[in-house]
Amino acid sequence: MYKLSLAVFIALLLLACTREDVSKNSQPTPAPAAQEVQLIEYAIRMPDTVPAGRYAFQVENAGKEDHGFEIEGNGIEQKTDILKRGDVTSLDVELKPGTYTVYCPVKGHKEKGMRKTVTVHQ
């Protein structure tokens, strides 16, 4: 019985040491940078260039019609739900250096000019 208890104690001690080492070496994941995006009739208001990194796009439909937000490029294709007037949502995306197209996926809006090219730099 004593040998079993000692073995359990040693195993727990090793487990505790391993967890402590892992927590010392791991770095917390940085929060995504907030980036405001405003959707209005046939325009998307946001910067033309941004640095590479994680983003939480805060997308607001400031227009009168329904709008949405989609981003494509560099292996990424993500979008929000369609937003009613005044709705706000968030879209988390990891952007690497390159060129992306953002646009409104509502039928006909992209063709009416509701799109733009965004350049992501190092």
Image (cartoon, rainbow, N blue to C red):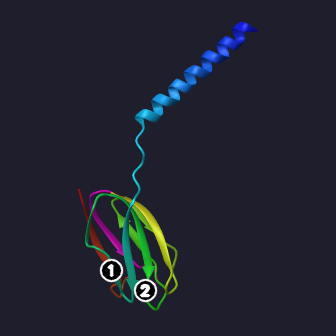
Q: Quadrant of the C terminus?
A: bottom left
Q: Which residue range is magenta in the image?
A: 96-109
Residue at x 57% of width, y 24% of height: 15
- Does 68 appear above or below 65? above
Horizontal side of residue 67 vs 95, given as left or right: right
Residue at 51% from the left image edge and 26% from the top image edge: 18
Which image quadrant for residue 59? bottom left
Left or right of 100, for residue 88: right
The residue at 43%/89% (across/down) is 63
Q: Residue at x 60, y 16 (%)?
A: 10
Mark 1 secondary-structure assignment: strand
- Residue 37 coordinates in the image, percent (x, y): 38, 76
Residue at the disc numbered 2: 62
* Amino acid type shown at disc 2: Ala
Residue 98 in the image, given as x and y percentages of width and height:
26, 61
Within 10 Å of the Cα at label 2, are there few (<14), some (14-19), or many (20+) other Cα atoms? Answer: some
Pointer 1 or 2: first along the chain = 1
The CA span between labels 1 and 2 is 10 Å
Instruction: Residue under label 1, please give it.
Output: 45
Amino acid on which disc 1 is placed: Arg
**Quick one: which residue is furthest to the bottom in this view?**
64
Residue 108 position (above or below residue 30): below
Judge by depth and name the residue closer to the eye, 34 or 77: 34
Tell me if residue 117 is in the magenta stretch: no
Q: Are marks 1 and 2 in contact (CB under 8 Å)?
A: yes
Query: Depth check: 46 or 10 in front?
Result: 10
